[in-house]
Image (cartoon, helix red, strand yellow):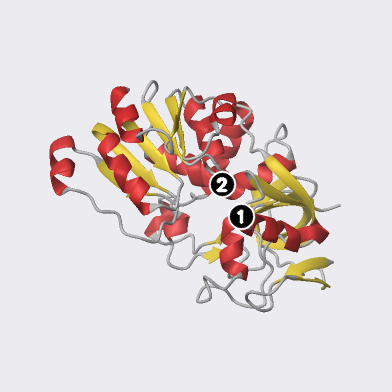
Amino acid sequence: MKAAICKEFKKPLLIEDIPIPEIGPDEVLIKVKYCGICHSDLHIVDGDWESWVKLPVVPGHEVAGIVEKVGTNVKNVKEGDKVGMPWLYSSCELCDYCVEGEEPLCPNHEITGITRQGGYAEYMKAPSHFVTKIPDNLELSYAAPLFCAGITVYAALVRLNIKPNELVVIQGIGGLGHLAIQYAKAMGAKVVALSHSDKEKVAKDLGADYFINSSKVDPVRELNALGGADAILTTVYDSKSIQNLVNALAPKGRLSVVGAAQEPIYVNPFDLITKRIVITGSAIGGRKLLREMLEFSAFNNIKPIIQEYPFEDVNKALDDLRAGKIILRGVLKFE
């Protein structure tokens, strides 16, 4: 089979012929049809997460494909099923976090495309307990990005406990934010799309009720004129702009960070006390939330906006992502 392999950081991936993985009794072999291209993949191949990554590695953690073969003990999926693999490759399944359905917090979890071989390959093997079926009415090309981008924002909104008719702000209308708009709207929220660039048309086409261009107006003033935000999901990497939005929270408002900004965020304790606001973070979700997100997406016809690349163009796709040429989500397509 052909696989794109990272053998050295800061170098192009090498497309090589390697053996199809042999599976164990509790594993499945997936014939990869699509694999999403995530910004995290750049951190992997560029060496930003050198302490995590075990070279050589096949990146890719937004996998959608067909079950080619199952191990002798596998009961939850069968050959021919549409399945996917997310960032979470496996966990111990025994600790308190795993039992609570919070497997990503397991101290012994493994990561697809980082500590285990991922989906930039024609085939990959995976533990059957962490393979997730894809609903029949959800196309594989659209399903692939949901296994990271989708679960990231869906889990964050669930943890924000969004209620119908609440004013929910999505900051950053990119690969994460354009999905978050759709999820928040389907949850019954009044959605405000907040961007530093002119993305009003795409935001409103996706369901946003309001659009604020933060490069032209003061977003805090605009949001407070609407009564203040009940919840804010921020997907950006700019700590200052995140910090500024704290001032737009209504009493009992909640703000969740999913963009890995590097600088600290400073908050006035008086605001925490007097307004009872909550500031938190979120990253992906366990198997329960993943299944729920896929069903929710299929039922509400929620899809990412994608740009497809042939597998052979994987390095071009990564270069385009570095250069900001992929508008929302990039996807590798396997013949």
Q: Amino acid at mark 2?
A: Ala
In the image, which disc is placed on residue 149?
A: 2
Residue 240 screen position, x and y as percent: 34, 51
Residue 66 screen position, x and y as percent: 77, 49
Image position of 20 with respect to 278: above or below: below
Name the residue at 53% across, 75% down. Answer: 50
Please tell me whether mark 2 sits on a helix, a strand or a loop: helix
> Horizontal placement of 278 versus 271: left or right?
right
In the image, which disc is placed on residue 38?
A: 1
Residue 51 screen position, x and y as percent: 50, 76
Q: Nearer the viewer, residue 195 or 8?
A: 195
Name the residue at 66% across, 65% down. Answer: 59
Q: Quadrant of the N terminus?
A: bottom right
Could you give the CA–CA distance between mark 1 and mark 2, rounded to whole angstroms? 8 Å
* Label 1–label 2 contact, CB within 8 A: yes
N-term mark: 1 or 2: 1
